[in-house]
Amino acid sequence: MCGWPAAGLAQTESAAAEAASPFPVASDVRIAGDEKQTRFILDLDKKVTLRAFALADPYRVVVDIPQVSFQLDSGSGTVARGLIKAFRYGLVMPGGSRIVFDLAGPAKIKNAYALDPANGQPARLVLELEAVDRTAFVQALAVESRPDLRPAIGVAGAPPAAVASAVPADDSRPVVVLDPGHGGIDNGTQSSGESEKGLVLSFGLALRDRLEKSGKYRVVMTRSDDTFIPLGDRVKIARSQSAALFVSIHADALPRGEGEAHGATVYTLSDKASDAEAERLADSENKADAIGGVNLTEEPTDVADILIELTQRETRTFSNRFARLVAAEMKSTARMHKHPLKSAGFRVLKAPDVPSVLIELGYVSNKEDLQQLLSENWRSRTVGAVAQAIDGFFTKRLVSAVPETRPGN
């Protein structure tokens, strides 16, 4: 989840699958220039529309385009040149792809345009950057942020999409939201050619199938394919669906040279991290929006009042109860971390009225854990354990919600 390299987030896919893609294909990339002016050129098999804007802290430029099948060489986004330190690319919504550039310093977008094929050259996307000082960068940023000058990628104010089967309005089953971490432009941790986003999606889909088969719950996925979902939208999905439980699924990795760790961990929300490792993990996870190029200045802030605070206290009690159930059930199927219950300030767990936990299935940086994460047998047994914990959670809530009957009543 957290141990992404600064630049190696580009996803490679099989040429055979891409050849049949109905989407434009990006086949090559070139970067030229120096620390004053830099040009980025992306070759495509057809012309596309684009929108480019800059973000600060850290300095980034984001280019939004229609959905594209990227067939770039592995590692192409890791080559630094001029004003571009690195870039990454991927799906950010159905029908929409994004390229995010990490900049060496403040720069303005001098030009951003697309060219038709001509004179034996393919269609091209061209981005020209020019170095500026911090003041000029911030001034340009203010203009770009004006909604009348920079249209959004989607409809402003539209609720985030959720992946759920159509159900009758009178369906009273509790809603369980499953949140496979990362996706699209954000690969998460990577090891031995495996990306966290794919491992946790496979687990999430298997858990969805298990829960739906029981018929006890209505299951909503924050994502069911390789799409990037901003952290705030994951929380909004849970709240908009009146979720009774939110389960975020991830896999951890220790940065190279920082020792060895293994086993699954269950995290709950806390203002103060339970230990240094939990704090590191939360800090890294909370950077997912920066990785995806989300403009955090446009996110609405929640209104904090005493009612929300009281709701949060009750929600955290239920979250902690569920976390203990998950850890207890998973002990029979998965290797557990030496401290399996932890807490930290994860943004994705901050719905004030939805009990929420984040499950770290293991460390992709650990050989034995990675073997388990790739094992269908392990996945099936561990999915069963989490499903059992969910059953236990709702059974206890239903029992506690029934008022006691007094003799003679």
Image (tube, grey):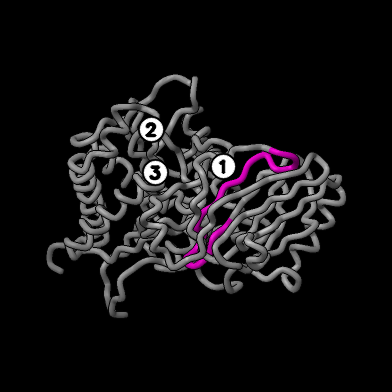
- Please name the residue shown 69% across and 50% down the image: 40
- Please name the residue shown 28% across and 43% down the image: 326
Residue nearest the observer in this picture, 154 or 114: 114
- Please name the residue shown 70% across and 43% down the image: 84
Q: CA distance from mark 2 to mark 1?
A: 18 Å
Residue contact between numbered discs 3 and 1, judged by CB atoms under 8 Å: no
Q: Nearer the viewer, mark 3 or mark 1?
A: 1
Q: Which residues are magenta?
A: 81-98
Q: Position of residue 83 (x, y in %)?
A: 74, 42
Asked if the magenta segment contains residue 82, the reply would be yes
Q: Position of residue 341 (x, y in %)?
A: 36, 35
- In the picture, the quarter occupied by the N terminus is top left
- In the picture, the quarter occupied by the C terminus is bottom left
Q: Is residue 196 above or below residue 136?
A: above
Residue nearest the observer in this picture, 396 or 139: 139
Could you tell me which secondary element the residue under label 3 belongs to? strand
Q: Dot 3, crowdedness within 10 Å: few (<14), some or many (≥20)?
A: many
- The type of residue carrying mark 3 is His
Asked if the magenta segment contains residue 243, the reply would be no
Q: In the drawing, does residue 34 fall left or right of residue 2? A: right
Q: Which residue is mark 1?
A: 76
Q: Which residue is mark 3?
A: 250
Q: Which residue is mark 2?
A: 192
Chief secondary structure of the magenta span?
strand
Residue 267 visible? The answer is yes
Q: Position of residue 54 (x, y in %)?
A: 72, 54
Q: In the drawing, does residue 296 fall left or right of residue 318? A: right
Residue 57 visible? The answer is no
- The type of residue carrying mark 1 is Ser
Q: Earlier in the sequence, mark 2 or mark 1?
A: 1
Tag of residue 108: none
